[in-house]
């Protein structure tokens, strides 16, 4: 089977992903495009440039009809921007799930994107800084179920719940709230 590669900017330089069919065969990061591609250990037949080109305005096809670049998405209301790496992840999800119609949560660094997919299109999105807030407040990887239920049942008390968890030193409660 033929290899293809996705190549684009990443924190600290460039990221390259070597793909065989729908399987990731290798990943590499480096300070230059050439070094990232060389680190993959195989010569791709095609390179898809992630983040290249003007972002597509939602609603838009997850996979563009043509071109060698995969830009991100933008949305006017509510204002949102999603990078090309997330768009590639959505394409991979659709390749596995076929005619998915629903919401997908995709992480991009310290931002979570909730994207409505339907008929091969990204219809709309809503992004959140939740991962950034959890990190800033010293939350844990796993949330407290009790804290999660408290915040779901009394969302108006979120700030008070977070302060109480902070004072108690309960990182799981911070994440749950």
Image (cartoon, rainbow, N blue to C red):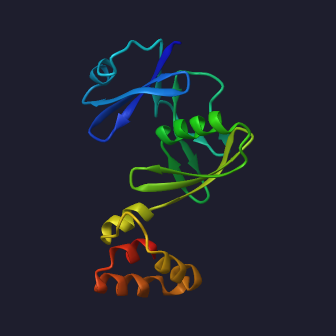
Query: Between 137 and 171, which is closer to the camera in this rendering?
Result: 171
The part of the image, by quadrant, that contains residue 133 is bottom left
Residue 158: percent from the left, percent from the top? Answer: 47, 82
Residue 80: percent from the left, percent from the top? Answer: 53, 54
The part of the image, by quadrant, that contains residue 129 is bottom left
- Is 108 left or right of 80, judged from the image as shown? left
Residue drawn at (47%, 79%) of the image: 147
Residue drawn at (62%, 31%) of the image: 63
Above or below, 131 against 82 in this view is below
Residue 103: percent from the left, percent from the top? Answer: 65, 53
- Is 125 left or right of 163, judged from the image as shown? right
Residue 167: percent from the left, percent from the top? Answer: 29, 86
Picture mark count:
0
Above or below, 6 against 80 in this view is above
Residue 61 seen in this snapshot: no
Above or below, 76 against 118 in this view is below
Query: Between 22 and 29, which is closer to the camera in this rendering?
Result: 22
Looking at the rendered image, the quarter that the C terminus falls into is bottom left
- Is 126 left or right of 17, judged from the image as shown? right
Residue 20 seen in this snapshot: yes
């Amino acid at each position: 089977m033929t290899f293809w590669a996705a190549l684009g900017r990443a924190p600290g330089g460039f990221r390259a992903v070597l793909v065989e069919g729908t399987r990731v065969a290798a990943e590499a990061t480096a300070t230059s495009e050439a070094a990232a591609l060389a680190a993959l250990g195989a010569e791709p037949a095609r390179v898809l440039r992630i983040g290249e080109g003007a972002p597509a305005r939602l609603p838009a096809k997850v996979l563009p009809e043509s071109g060698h670049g995969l830009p991100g998405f933008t949305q006017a209301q509510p204002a949102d921007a999603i990078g090309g790496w997330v768009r590639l992840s959505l394409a991979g999800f659709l390749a596995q799930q076929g005619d998915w119609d629903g919401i997908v949560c995709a992480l991009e660094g310290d931002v979570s994107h909730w994207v409505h997919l339907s008929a091969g299109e990204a219809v709309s999105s809503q992004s959140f800084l939740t991962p950034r807030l959890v990190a800033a407040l010293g939350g844990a990887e796993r949330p407290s179920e009790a804290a999660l239920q408290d915040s779901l049942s009394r969302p108006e008390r979120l700030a008070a719940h977070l302060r109480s968890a902070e004072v108690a030193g309960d990182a799981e409660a911070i994440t749950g709230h």
